[in-house]
Amino acid sequence: MGYSRQIYDEADKIMQDRRNRALKNADNRKKRFFQKYPEAQELERQLSHTMTDLIRTMLGNKTNLSVAMNKVKAENLATQMSLNQIYRKAGITKESLEPHFVCEKCQDKGNIDGKICDCYKQLVKEIAYNQLNKLSPLKLSSFDTFSLHYYSDIKTDEEELSEREQMQLYFNKCKSYAENFTKDAKSIIMRGNTGLGKTHLSLAIARKVIERGFGVIYCSAPDILSKLEREQFSRNYNKSEESVEDTLKECDLLILDDMGSEFSTNFTKNKIYNLINHRLSCNLPTIISTNFTFKELEQTYSQRLISRIIGEYMAFNFVGHDIRQMKRAEQMNK
Ligand SMILES: Nc1ncnc2c1ncn2[C@@H]1O[C@H](COP(=O)(O)OP(=O)(O)OP(=O)(O)O)[C@@H](O)[C@H]1O
Ligand SMILES: [Mg+2]
Ligand SMILES: [Zn+2]
């Protein structure tokens, strides 16, 4: 699936809690029932004994096997009937004393015969989604909340398209990209001045792609680079564990926001180069957003990297005026 180890750890913990809670609640229900109907506890004890008797009979005396087995079975049935009578008297069913799992299919173990259960996949998706939500106003950044009215519909003679028409085109492309996303989808670079909706549209893509069950990592370049730096130079760094870097290299979709706004050092340049290059070589999609022009990108990173990006990424050049400011003005006027 391609999420970070932290997400799987959290999912494992939730599954474990669910299972423990189901078992504990069932245990409590049974205890209360036995307190009220002690004779039921005795009958249950007998039932479990008849099971061991049955096994012993099967392993032991072969000559009278069928006679012995029938006797054990008859006893078992009689005990079961007495128990059922008590259940009826108490107004409950046998099932109501059993554990109630969130997922009956895997009994909250997360897998069935070693195969990952759907409930676990769903849970991992929800955790990834929530994590992203904590980092950014994901709730507000969907395709539904993206409005074209912020972009001018005036068209000058030299221009083929108005800003609104241009942005409508990008919007359609982003939406269809998210709806048809596959692990070998193309990469995208969103370029443009501040406040034009680059982060908004990349988060809208993230949201949809996560909903469709893919592993998406959204991060801003400065944040992730300082994380990588800490990881690299941490003395406690355990090489056998999956690193942040591996996750960035392998997730189904990486969204690298604000590229170029990190404090530039040889370390950051190398990391960005390796990351983007690795994902391109493996045909894994990346969405980059940046305020830099291609020229500025070339000056900051290696020319080789930027020419690969120009050659292989779809480029969306955002146009318009700072929507962050327009929204602030709208708020003030309310
Ligand atoms: N077309 C739009 N419709 C509605 N809200 C928008 C639109 N574009 C941007 N916004 C909102 O305006 C704010 C700024 O947008 P966003 O963060 O996407 O800009 P950006 O291009 O990423 O800017 P920066 O380069 O500074 O990171 C956000 O709150 C975003 O939700
Ligand atoms: Mg942004
Ligand atoms: Zn399950």
Image: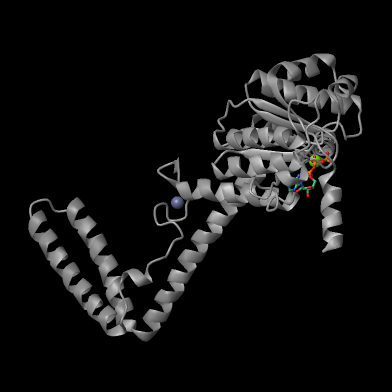
Q: Position of residue 92 (x, y in %)?
A: 32, 78
Q: At 75% from the left edge and 18% from the top edge, which residue is drawn?
A: 310
Q: Is residue 309 left or right of residue 195?
A: left
**Which residue occupies the foreground of this view, 253 or 251?**
253
**Which residue occupies the foreground of this view, 264 or 88?**
264
The image quarter containing residue 57 is bottom left
Q: Is residue 106 left or right of residue 73?
A: right
Q: Position of residue 4 (x, y in %)?
A: 65, 40
Q: Position of residue 163 (x, y in %)?
A: 76, 35
Q: At 84% from the left edge and 41% from the top edge, which residue is drawn?
A: 321
- For the image shown, how many numbered marks are present on the structure? 0
**Residue 95 visible to an observer of this rendering:** yes
Q: Position of residue 113 (x, y in %)?
A: 40, 43
Figure check: 245 above or below 148: above
Figure check: 5 above or below 290: below
Furthest residue in direction front, as rendered: 157
**Which residue occupies the foreground of this view, 88 or 122?**
122
Ligand 2, seen in the image, is in the quarter at top right
Image quadrant in which the C terminus is located: bottom right
Q: Is residue 320 left or right of residue 201?
A: right
Q: At 48% from the left edge and 50% from the top edge, which residue is drawn?
A: 119
The image quarter containing residue 83 is bottom left
Image quadrant in which the N terminus is located: top right
The image quarter containing residue 230 is top right
